[in-house]
Image: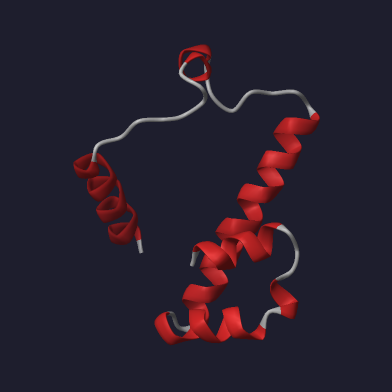
Amino acid sequence: MIKWAELVTWNKARYDDEAFAQLAKHFDSTEIVELTTVAAFRGLMNRFMDSLHIELEGPELQARGGRAVASQEDLHAYLEKLVNLV
């Protein structure tokens, strides 16, 4: 899935049939569309924010090198919440 996001980000997904085939082993067509939409939207937002010189994270996070810290439990709870939205 991470490779797919990278291919979408660099606009190379259309040329990598093997990556699509691997993705299709794990996700149906609707899920592939959703994954692709999220990857494309994140790329759009990054370009938009960078072009306007807007930091995505506040000064506190920037001071830590721009990396967010979350526990495994927090990430699990977040994913559960996303799954339950569907």
Q: Is residue 77 above or below residue 35?
A: above
- x then y, percent, for residue 66: 52, 25
Residue at 59% of width from left, 57% of height from top? Answer: 39
Looking at the image, the residue that sits furthest to the left is 73
Left or right of residue 73: residue 2: right
Q: Quadrant of residue 3?
A: bottom right
Q: How many marks?
A: 0
Q: Where does the image place residue 16, in percent across and percent down from the top left? A: 68, 79
Image coordinates of residue 72 in percent, x first then y, are: 23, 43
- Establish if 62 lies above or below 48: above
The residue positioned 51% from the left and 62% from the top of the image is 2
Quarter of the C terminus within the rendering: bottom left
User: Residue 10 placed where, x, y %?
Assistant: 73, 59
Viewer-proximal residue among 1 and 55: 1
Q: Nearer the viewer, residue 5 or 83?
A: 5
Which residue appears at 61% of the width and 48% of the height? 42
Q: Quadrant of residue 38?
A: bottom right
Q: How is the image coloured?
A: secondary structure
* Residue farthest to the right, as pictured: 51
